[in-house]
Image: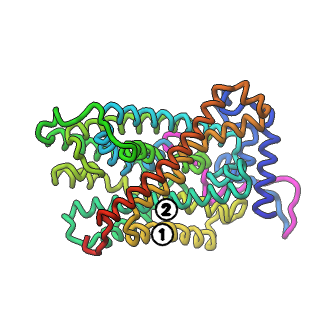
Amino acid sequence: MSGCATSLLMVDMSEKRFEDTSSPSLEETDANAPPVGYHDVDVFGSEKDHQVLLPHTVGNHTRAGFHSRLEQIQYKTLTWPLVAVLMIAEIVSNGMLSLPSSLATVGLVPGLVLIIFLGSFALFTSWLLIKFKLRHPEVHNMGDAGYILFGPVGREVLSFGTIVFAVFATGGQILAGQIALGVLSSNKLCSMLYTGIFAIPTLLCALPRTLDQLSWLSVASVICIMVAGIVGMAGAGLHPIDGWSDQFSVAVKTDFVSAFISITNPVFAYAGHFMFFILISEMRRPNDAMKAAYTLQIFATTFYAVFAAVTYIYLGPKVASPSFTSLPLKWSKAAYGIAIPNFLIAGSLYSHTAAKLLFVRFFRESRHLHDHTLFGWGVWTFLIVLMNGAAFVLAVGVPIFNYLIGIAASLFASWYTYGIAGAFWLYDAWVYKGRFDAWKRRWAMSGLSWLTLAAGAFICVAGMYVTIKQIVDAYDSGQLVWSASE
């Protein structure tokens, strides 16, 4: 059966199975188990007691009935605390180092309002994504969700966007590692060498086939970024700028471009929802996913707000992005050195996500998905090398790569983190609860969903405009000059 036909069959099965269930995103689901039939449609099948149900086969013929066998590769092993750790390790990373500069642009109060509002908004869209996943267990990634909403074109566009954004995000983490290594060694080597040195362990850490194997590395990653942030705040507090109490501003008047940059920084700091479907697909109990999302957003929003405020207050309006660079050298080295494992693991999670999307699409319902076959491991290793190799080439070979990350984030993260979640709710309400009548009856959620779509579109368009203007301004000012000795 072709991939397209298989997907159509799974969507049809899912709709029939759930057409009489509660309204999407509005009523409670069973807290103790996923919807009936969830594991029959889910990409990894029924892994009860870590076993997979397979049809009896004799030669090339399939008999009626099923038998079970122990899987060699078990995917659905994650508990919600480990999923929360993976989410935090992926999202709370180098993006937070740009937040103090956002406060310097718009002022302390508007900046904190933005960070808290966007964190709360991200929690709302997390809820919508998780509800959609529970109703559509066949969804493994954004591409699968795009197929349900928009057909084959939607699958290709959202899959492409996921891979592109994941590769660019991997490159961003590699560059963060390059900066950290450069600070630690006082830039004694060519920046390309630092990038290569950091890219190798990033690739190696992405190689495990299941996220469970990466989750324990992510525990160390979360601890490292927390400690690094505390060290950064301590360094700022112990070595503030002169007259720091008079340097920070409650609010700052600024132009649109500068102000919107202060918006995009926290938007991209929360950008990680494109991984949520893949993470939930590897959970033992998918209905616990919202617990992980609450943990993520409460931690991220609180940590971001405290870190940004403390750093900005003590380092003032000229605080750099990344902010660790504004610390005294010893403190900067300490903060960057502690943060390196986080940059590494975040990059590994991004490249793992891009490779996993393609691998599952290639081998869905194939023995290569669950067995240690030479061909399966060969393809998986090739995909990991390809994703990390592409990230490395972009990071070292494109002078405007930092700006390209901004373009990729504007094009895709704006939708994956915010906008498209509204479409998920509107689709389910339309299909399962009565089309326009459902939208009218649930006018509050309908309005919020349309506003979510509008917010995603605004962030996408405005983010593209601001980033392109930054590139033009950088060229005009001669800032985009590259050399191997940098």
Q: Is mark 2 on a helix, strand or loop?
A: helix
Residue 273 falls inside the magenta stretch: no
| Amino acid type for the residue under numbered disc 1 | Ala
Q: Position of residue 66 (x, y in %)?
A: 81, 53
Q: Where is residue 40 in the image (x, y as percent from the top left)?
A: 75, 47
* Residue located beneath label 2 in the image: 167
Residue 63 falls inside the magenta stretch: yes
Highlighted magenta segment, given as a residue range: 60-83
Q: Residue at x 69, y 45 (%)?
A: 137
Q: Position of residue 200 (x, y in %)?
A: 39, 68
Q: Where is residue 95 in the image (x, y as percent from the top left)?
A: 38, 49
Circle 1: is it few (<14), some (14-19), or many (20+) Cα within 10 Å?
some
Residue 223 visible at all = no
Q: Is residue 480 above or below residue 42?
A: below
Q: Which residue lies furthest to the bottom in this view?
A: 484
Residue 349 visible at all = yes
Q: What element carries label 1?
A: helix
Placement of the C terminus among the 4 image quadrants: bottom left
Q: Is 172 left or right of 147, judged from the image as shown?
A: left
Q: Is 249 left or right of 381, judged from the image as shown?
A: left
To which quarter of the image does residue 252 belong? top left
Q: Is disc 1 in contact with disc 2, using a CB cutoff of under 8 Å?
A: yes
